Image (cartoon, rainbow, N blue to C red):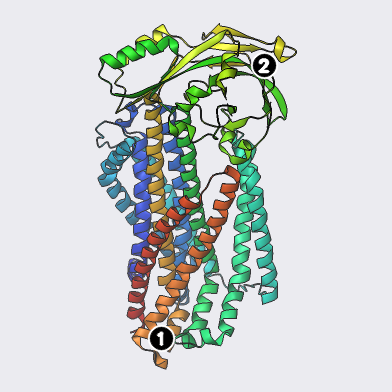
Amino acid sequence: MYLKIIRRGLYNFRDSYLIYILSCSFAITVLSVLATIVDDPSLQMVRNWHANLKSLMQGMMFIFAFFTFIYMIYVGGFFVKQQRQEFMTYEKLGMSRHIVAVIAFIQTFIVQIVAWLIGMLVAVILQKFFGMLLVYLMHVRMEFRFHFSMVAFHMMFQFFITSALIFSLVNALRVYWMQRKNSKRTRLHLNDFCKSLLGILGAMLFLIGMFVSIPLIQESKQTNVLDEILPGVMVVMLLFLVGSYLIYYGFLPLVLKILEKIKTFSYRGTNLFAYKYLRKRLVQNTSIIWFVTELSALALTILIFCFMGYQIVHSDYSNSYPFEISANQNTAKEIRNELNSNGSKVKKEYSSPVKKTIGQIYNQNTGDYEQRLVMAMPYSSYRNMPKMIRKNNPKINSHQFLEIRGNPQTLYTKYRDAKSSVIIQNQQTINKVKIGAFYPFGSAMFSEIAMVVPDEYFAKLPTKFSDTFYGWDFHGSDKLSHKFIKKIDKKNNPNSIRVKVGSNIEKSSLQEIPNSEDRDWHTNEYNQVPYVRQANARIQIRQLTGIFIFLIFIFSIALLIALGSLLTLKVLLKDDYEWRQLKTLKKVGLTENELKQIVRRETSFLFTIPIIFALAQSVIAAIVINVALKQSSLLSFGMIGLAYIALYGLVGILTFHLSWRSVKQRIN
């Protein structure tokens, strides 16, 4: 008998359970694929996999597992609430509360078994596809082979047993608590004025969080320790979450009530019969709408922030390696001969004489002048550099000075507009200097202060450390062999230049020091490299970018499916009172098309309100990121927002058709 009760409960809500099972199965599939990819033997041979890529994948896997757990346990409670009257009937027929709770436990456990079986089976089928996709995005030339990992299977089996037992136990406790006798639940009812005050308080908290996040993002750029900014991040998240919920709780019922008072709206068409029904449904689903809004806003904000982060990383990569190969005069001849012999198609060769001296540079972070190593190059050589390099720096003429700093803050307009003087050893003070961000031969070649100076100034600049830098651009790759790279690395070891700081800049001096692994490094020492090759860094950049795109793609699809299924289940799982309302409207005389219009309007409200507020919050987040990072995020926000709206709209259309199908079955 108990099995028949369980089977009938599953059958009555088969459409809703099917949506829940499919969404859970997709999350389980993604989680299983990530677990198998982490230990896949094919990827163990990828360069840098053990250094940072594997740990990145593991971290994202655990984050995804956490959100999957939250989704399953949150949405699973919908079915318990929907079957409330059914469980209460069993108790009235003589079943004990413990038996009813056991029925809910078994019912939930069966659903979890089905979801996990489907998810694991699909993961086995799609593992090679996702692996090949990851390898392709990472630009790795290798054959990804299917691999069944017992370690990953054992971990996923443990997660299945643990999560299924927890979900089943939670639903059983919900049912047991639901059947408690002689319990009087009191609810706090607030009038519109009190709700408006809460809404105003929520808006204030939201604005406070927005203003606090600006210095927090700026601080995050200047520290490598997460613990220093983590408390601030938690406070900002709490302000946003509490503030947005109070805005919904305070203003949404008030706005809906105002619309009800507008007769041209509430007494028009089917609203004459259905608006009160819609208003009550929306007010009851305030927490759901808020939850979906925050998840959507979080998804959009993360995508915008990641896209802008990718832009900054790509900009830094271009700054570090503007040429395929950059070299000094010690290695340039060997590299040029090798390029001529191996058939590399050199597009153009660039060169410039440089002089290394001591400069007294103003540090905007500390507010003091510091003695630093400075590399000077003449304006005539800088003018012959590619436009790609010069366009990222302020324009100068043959009589102006340009200071190029390795500090990432020089990417930002406010920093570039700063005015400060520069003192070069044995030279007059340079009172007017423009500040740039992109090195002519790359920050990987010389990562300290670089100065572009007039030709006359450069000719008179005395120094005992002079050099010539070279840069090559190619049609295709440089075709340098590993044998040649090892040969040139063995022959040309990097060295360092130490600034021996005196009481003033005129008494300071430079000292060249050979590099060795056993010597101690001191402050004011600057590493000098004989050459840099873009291909060495490009491999790691491509791998990181590929994993980044792979994870963002999976997370975006999974989050969209979770949000869509959440709203769809909330639309489908109407309680008995709501079904009676729809049946009453049909008895009053509403046609099937008019009832369909009511369902369409309800679905539209339930999907449109969260996305509007999510886009509004995302715009605010984009503005905050723009102010904090001094980067334009409007284009990225527009592209990501339009793509998200399109996918979100498709889910809404599918939800409407499923909801109307369910309504027709119940009211006919």
Amino acid carrying label 2: it is Gln
Q: Which of 581 and 523 is in front in this view?
A: 523
Position of the C terminus by quadrant: bottom left
What amino acid type is highlighted by mark number 1?
Answer: Lys
> Residue 427 has which mark?
2
Residue at point 34%, 58% (across, down): 22
Which secondary structure, mark 2? loop
What's the mark number on residue 321? none
Q: As drawn, is 472 to the left or to the right of 417?
A: left
Q: In this view, does 617 lie above or below 250?
A: above
Mark 2–mark 1 contact, CB under 8 Å? no
Q: Residue 155, relative to residue 597: is it above or below?
A: above
Residue 147 on image: x %, y %? 27, 36
| Total count of labels | 2
Q: Where does the N terminus fall, quadrant-wise?
A: bottom left
Q: How crowded is mark 2: few (under 14 residues within 10 Å), some or many (20 or more)?
A: few
Helix, strand or loop at mark 1: helix
Distance between the alpha carbons at the discs numbered 2 and 1: 92 Å
Residue 641 location (% of width, % of height)? 45, 57
Q: Which of 373 and 612 is in front in this view?
A: 373
Q: In which quarter of the image is residue 546?
A: top left
Q: Which residue corresponds to mark 1?
A: 583
Residue 288 placed where, x, y %? Answer: 51, 65
Residue drawn at (67%, 76%) of the image:
192
Residue 663 drawn at (x, y percent): 36, 78
Q: Which sits earlier in the primary sequence, circle 2 or circle 1?
A: 2
